[in-house]
Image: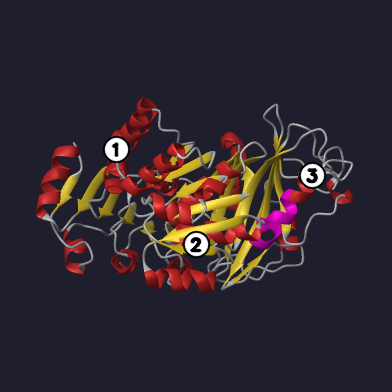
Amino acid sequence: MRVLICGGGDVALLLARRMSREGNDVVVVEADARRCEYLEEALDATIVRGHAASGRTLHRAGLTQADMLIAVTNSDEVNFLACLIAQNERAAKIRIARMRTHEVAYWRHMAENLGLEIDLIIHPESEVAERILRVLASPGVSDIHDFANGSVRLFGLTVQPQSWLAGKTLRELDAAGPPRNSIIAMIFRNQHVIIPRGSDTLEPEDHVYVCCNREEEDETMRFMGLPGHTKLESVFILGGRQISIQIARELESRNVQVKLFEQNLDRCNLLTELLDKTLIVNADGTEESILLEENIRGVSAFLSLTSDDEDNLIASLLARKLGAHKVVTLLNRLNYLTMAQRLGINTSISPRTVAVDQILQFVRKGRVLSVTTFREEEAEAIELLATEDSRYAGKRLMDLKFPDGCIVGAIAKPGGDVIVPRGASVIEAGDRVIFFALESAVPKLEQAFFRDRDGRGRN
């Protein structure tokens, strides 16, 4: 497939890298000359310098030969125009655009009314807000992800030096009697990702992901040494961006006390009009004296949501030092995600990886039900739908040969039952199978899973 990506930022870089590895012919359009030089070195793709809203540039990039156009520049208007040009040229049958505006619902409605054919309009900030809200009431948990319509949960935590988990092998943990439908799915250790086996040992500072049945979530958290879900009483938010407004409104509806820190006075006045119960503080939320004055000690959660990654990191470290129970950091630069974990910031989230997940899920739609990327795309959780002619259907897991670097984390049955499988478990038609895999193993896994019993692949 020929894929034309408009924009050369980090989202485009991740998409181009992934889609190139999967055998697609990728072309990236980027206006900045220095960024083009970097992309030339980083990608196995064609780089075209020019403006993505220019018909001439898009033609030079091979628009009329493209099967798919993905517009992820830093301008909503340019992304829409690129899709409009593709429609006018009857090119790129599949068109995807990223929107950052809080008026995304209006833009979707306008596109529909005008007959603008965009197959997917993504708004990563909305998904980021949902992910943050999902994890706020769970101290010690870095992130929570849902699969199989919420019946399967995956949560992350860091193994503390004093934790009873430290030094234990997975085989020893299994002997300690964890909830039946739970499994340690991934271990992130420094720069390495481990898809674990029974002999692997948990070490202090490992970041671990645990998969479980939704009904056994609290029990599984307690087994892992976590308090489980707690009552959310007060939240501090740093930065008056749209995502902050969205989260504050939701917290207001839950009767949570919210303080929002914003340095720009005009923005504070606007926030006062938009939010009903949130206390707006016109001050620098990275100042220790300000946070102490506003009684940060013991606050349920502190959210660093400014547009500046460095400010977010500094404020999060300070909030952690001053006694916030939960700290969440918004990071745009992907290489900061690992750094944040090393600094002891348990929960960090990037709108860019969220955007990549949304696009990859749509690109693979039909056979792939969900995609979740971890850190700098080192690993992936992928939810696949088993069909009757799949080569994996009707066989015990112990009799199947999976690609190296992947495991089955859970199987959700059509009737609603969820199991964390053992060797004798069987994948049946209609099952939703959640795999955890190294990024390099994902294409091999998809190819094997969707190859029928006669060895033929399916589209």
Q: In front here: 291 or 17? A: 17
Measured as percent of width and height from the top left, residue 181 is found at 69, 44
Q: Main secondary structure of the magenta part?
A: helix
Res. 114 image quadrant: top left
**Mark 2 in CB contact with mark 3 (< 8 angstroms):** no
Q: Residue at the spot x=56%, y=41% of the render? A: 362
Q: Quadrant of the C terminus?
A: top right
Label 1 crowd (10 A; few <14 / some 14-19 / many >=20): few
> Mark 3 near mark 1, Cβ–Cβ under 8 Å?
no
The residue at which mark 1 appears reads as 103
Q: Check the image and report above or below for 150 versus 42.
A: above
Type of the residue with mark 1: Glu
Residue annotated with mark 3: 457
Q: Earlier in the sequence, mark 2 or mark 1?
A: 2
User: Residue 296 placed where, x, y %?
Assistant: 25, 58
Give whichever of discs 3 and 1 has the lower sequence position: 1
The answer, for residue 351, to whether it is visible in the render is no
Q: Quadrant of residue 161?
A: bottom right
Q: Position of residue 81 (x, y in %)?
A: 36, 44
Residue, disc 2: 13
Q: Which range is magenta? A: 437-446
Q: Is residue 331 magenta?
A: no
Residue drawn where x is 86% and y is 44% of the image: 396
Q: How far separated are the C-alphas under marks 3 and 1?
A: 42 Å
- Spatial separation of the CA atoms under disc 2 and disc 3: 28 Å
> Which of the pair 81/22 is nearer the observer?
81
Left or right of 387? Residue 226 is left
